[in-house]
Every structure is written in C-alpha cells, then in structure tokens.
Image: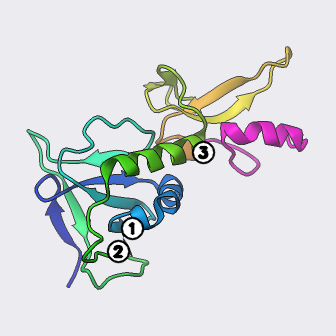
Amino acid sequence: MDVEALPVGRWWDAVRAPSNIGERALKTLGDETGAVIEDMYGTLYWLIAVGSATSWHLRQVRVLTELADESTYLGVPPASWTTGPKSHWRVPLGPNRYLTHPWRLREALAEADRAEYGPMPEGRHLCYHCQLPTSEPIPVDVEARGNGVGKTIYACPTHAPLYPTDQQPRTLTSAAAAEHEGRR
C-alpha cells in the first residue's frame, strides 16, 4: 500500500496548516480533533465537512476543496501508517475520530495564528522581499527609529522564513520581550 491521491470536496474538505500553526492548534483542540494527516514536511491536514470552511482567512492556512474549474487532491496514507517520516496519520482515524468540527478548528487555528504572529494587521502590507502587497502579512521584525517608535517589517508567507537575521527568528509579539531582555 502507498499514499493514495483522493479528491477533496467529494467526501470531505481538508484544512492545511504549516507545522508551527498546526502544532499549536492540535494542542488546543486536544481530544476534540478529528483525524489529522501529517506530511513529510510537518504540514498538518484536518478533514472537515464539505463546504464548511469556504470563507476562512487565516495566515498560511489553506482550505482545500473542489473548485468549479479544477480538482484538488490530497495524499491520504493507509490507516495503518501512524508514524513518519513519510505522510502518516498524526491523529489516526477511528470510529469516533474522523471529521473535525470546523468552527472549533477555526478557533484553534486563529488562536495559534495570533500566538505565532501577533494580531492580524489591518489591510495589505508590502513584503520586504518581493515588494508585493500581501493580505497575509507576517511581522518579521521591528526596525528601530531615532524617535523610539519602531516600524514593523512584514513578509508574505513565502518569504517570511527567508527574512535575514543573525539571531533566532522572532515574532512581533516576542519583540517586546527581546527588547526587555536587552537583545535588540
């Protein structure tokens, strides 16, 4: 047996979250999570009812569903694959563990998004790298200014991990802690 490409939008939709957001959400959901697939990169995929998450807007979280003009497939591992490093069931399928309640999942992902990246900024912001506006701005740094007021530097989800830094990456929410600790 091997991973099988199954169409999303037929039996279920899927919600994809990067490992940093997904791990926090998984911890928040606890026993309220349904089955979860983890791929070889650490990305997590929850299965939810078809059409239950079409209006979600969270940074780096994607709802995978059937679209009118294209099909989307998700690699689903055999039920017996419960450990990595390949795609596997992070939270195995079970009689009472299949679909995750969509609004509980959305709240857990939103909480994880805020904890990881801070509050969602209003409007669109330019990415420091590609200089394109992004509606999913991720704060990557605070640029100090002579007047003591910092300017927030944003990145799009693609370029946020590439932000050049000579220290541990930090989120905007940890910038104040770094300043307090004298690391700025």
Bounds of the magenta segment: 163-184
Asked if the residues shown at circle 2 and circle 1 are in contact, with their CB atoms under 8 angstroms apart, the answer is: yes
Tell me the SS state at disc 3: helix
Q: Residues within 10 Å of mark 3 (few under 14, many from 20)?
A: some
Q: Residues within 10 Å of mark 1 (few under 14, many from 20)?
A: many
- Using the image, tell me which numbered label, if any, was put on residue 89: 2
- Using the image, tell me which numbered label, if any, was put on residue 158: none
Mark toward the viewer: 1 or 3 = 3
Amino acid carrying label 3: it is Ala
- Which residue is depicted at the point 31% across and 49% down? 102
Q: Answer with left or right where residue 75 lies relative to residue 60.
A: left
Residue 161 among magenta residues: no
Question: Which residue ends up furthest to the top in the rendered image?
Answer: 147
Residue under pointer 1:
38
Q: Answer with left or right where residue 146 lies relative to residue 70.
A: right
- Which residue is depicted at the point 26% across and 67% down? 98
Image location (x, y in percent) of residue 178: 81, 42
Examine the image and state in which quarter residue 53 appears.
Answer: top left
Residue under pointer 3:
115
Image location (x, y in percent) of residue 128: 57, 29
Amino acid carrying label 1: it is Glu
Residue 180 among magenta residues: yes
Amino acid carrying label 2: it is Trp
Task: Out of 27 and 38, give the one closest to the viewer.
Answer: 27
Separation of marks 3 and 2 at Cα, in angstroms: 25 Å
Asked if the residues shown at circle 1 and circle 3 are in contact, with their CB atoms under 8 angstroms apart, the answer is: no
Separation of marks 1 and 3 at Cα, in angstroms: 21 Å
- Which residue is depicted at the point 10% across and 56% down? 10
Q: Is residue 60 above or below residue 97?
A: above
Tell me the SS state at disc 2: strand
Examine the image and state in which quarter residue 3 appears.
Answer: bottom left
